[in-house]
Image (tube, grey):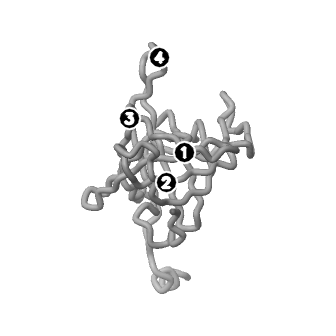
């Protein structure tokens, strides 16, 4: 059952994760993920090849989606019921190598589900990798894979970058005019 009151959801915010990404036998590379979960039902998932808090690297992949949260009753009674985020992508962007331009793909995406848990004290969101739990066109429910990978995300609180400009008030500026 989806939760329609997204404004009060503890999931709303920006979440970041750094992990080692390995594809088969290849050497792993550091991958940063930033997920912005908005109260208006929008979700933006960015992937970075460099730490986005150090400088301003462009995301190498971007996924734009609609989201909702609810409980999922697994068809396997032993797995029971668990909380999920339903992510319905509508646009994907891939950075074109050597440029700051993106190749854009729209529509024709299948909604996926991610199991989650939230530790408020630690500002930590644990998310599973995304899975298709409802087969399109048949609405047949599937069990959540037991071997799923889970990643920990920390709530992102932007830090102020140093500036050469000293903050001041209008009255102070007027006092220095000649």
Q: Residue sitting at 43 percent across and 61 percent down?
A: 11
User: What residue is disc 3 on?
Assistant: 146
Q: Is mark 3 on a helix, strand or loop?
A: loop
Q: Please, is residue 65 above or below residue 57 in the view?
A: below
Residue 99, located in which quarter of the rendered image? top right
Q: Name the residue under label 4.
A: 24
Q: Quadrant of residue 83?
A: bottom left
Q: Which of 157 and 150 is in front in this view?
A: 150
Q: Residue 23, position in %: x, y?
A: 48, 21
Which disc is residue 141 wearing? 1
Give 7 or 94, whichever is nearer the viewer: 7
Residue 16 higher or lower than 20, as above or below: below
The Cα–Cα distance between marks 3 and 1, rounded to whole angstroms, is 15 Å
| Element type at mark 1 | strand
Residue drawn at (44%, 23%) of the image = 22
Judge the density around disc 2: few (<14), some (14-19), many (≥20) Cα neighbours within 10 Å: many
Q: For mark 2, what is the residue?
A: 85
Vertical order, 83 against 91 (above or below): below
Per the model, the C-alpha gap separating discs 4 and 3 is 20 Å
């Amino acid at each position: 059952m989806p939760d329609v009151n997204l404004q009060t959801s503890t999931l709303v915010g920006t979440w970041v994760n750094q992990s080692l990404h390995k594809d088969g036998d290849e050497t792993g590379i550091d991958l940063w993920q930033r997920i912005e979960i908005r109260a208006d039902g929008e979700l933006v998932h960015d992937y970075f090849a460099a730490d986005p808090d150090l400088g301003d690297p462009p995301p190498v992949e971007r996924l734009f989606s609609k989201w909702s949260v609810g409980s999922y009753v697994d068809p396997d009674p032993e797995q029971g019921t668990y909380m999920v985020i339903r992510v319905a992508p509508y646009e994907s962007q891939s950075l074109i190598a050597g440029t700051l331009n993106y190749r854009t793909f729209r529509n024709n995406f299948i909604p996926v589900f991610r199991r989650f848990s939230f530790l408020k004290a630690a500002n930590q969101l644990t998310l599973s990798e995304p899975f298709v739990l409802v087969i399109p066109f048949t609405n047949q429910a599937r069990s959540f894979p037991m071997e799923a990978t889970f990643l920990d995300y920390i709530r992102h609180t932007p830090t102020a970058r140093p500036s050469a400009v000293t903050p001041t008030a209008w009255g102070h500026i007027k006092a220095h005019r000649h």
